[in-house]
Amino acid sequence: MTIRPYVILSAAMSVDGYLDDVSPDRLRLSNAADFDRVDQVRAESDAILIGANTMRRDNPRLLVNSEERRAKRIADGKPAFPLKVTVTRTGDLSADLMFWHHGGQKLVITVDSAVEKVRATIGGLADVVSLGPELDWGLVLDELGHRGVEQLMVEGGGTIHTQLMAANLADEVHLAVAPLLVGQPEAARFLGPADYPGGSTARMKVLEIRAIDDVVLIRYAPKGRV
């Protein structure tokens, strides 16, 4: 039996729940100390996952930036960088994105109708696998478990966070709440409408609350909803 990864959803959001604003430039929500915390969680993880929309919008590298943390991973018998994973239903990716050209191994998980398109676009930049006609998050976690991923850090975007929370597949949520207000209805939000387990009265267990300079980190255990 495949052991699925321990899934951590990680996001920085404004007080009113937004991941970004609608300007062409990425809204910087976290501060330097919180970025360093995120770097630590990345270093502790076996894989980091983002959606294709987030790749296109933010063009992140998704690296462990600390040389000391990379050295510790190597000393522990791990690759310097976690596996980088993206998921796409459409196959609309670009080989020019920084995701492919930094760090270690990469994996694209897609569906049958898009797998050849992804392979033609990406070439040898990543391993590409289809899990069937539809994107099933249970199968995604099974695939990662088969690949030895014990801890998965999910860094967005909001659609993926919503889907994993609605499917009750998130083990932890790390929310860095920035002292900002966006107030733009068309901007991306941390979570969207969904049929969440337990409904609107189910309360999640709080694992930790602490201030990181002007950002507040809240860690929740979604599966502990009562």
Image (cartoon, rainbow, N blue to C red):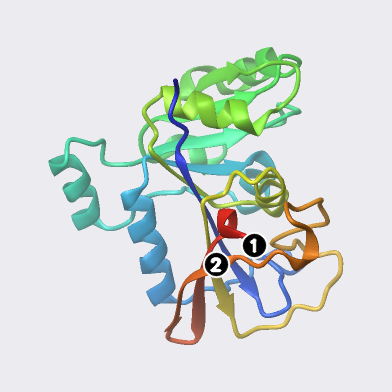
Residue occupying the point 57% across, 53% down: 223
> Can you tell which mark lies on residue 226?
1
**Label 1: which secondary element:** loop
* Image: 94 above or below 68: above
Residue behind mark 2: 205
Q: Nearer the viewer, residue 159 or 221?
A: 221
**Label 2: which secondary element:** strand
Residue 38: give x, y in percent of width and height.
41, 62
Would residue 68 be visible to someone looking at this image? yes
| Residue type beneath disc 2 | Lys
State how far apart marks 1 and 2 are (Cα): 8 Å
Would residue 94 be visible to someone looking at this image? no
Q: Are marks 1 and 2 in contact (CB under 8 Å)?
A: yes
Crowd rating for badge 2 (residues with CA inside 10 Å; few <14, some 14–19, many 20+):
some
> Can you tell which mark lies on residue 25?
none
| Residue 123 image-quadrant placement | top right
Residue occupying the point 62% across, 53% down: 58
Residue occupying the point 63% across, 18% down: 131
Q: Nearer the viewer, residue 4 or 31?
A: 4
Judge left or right: residue 161 versus residue 148.
right
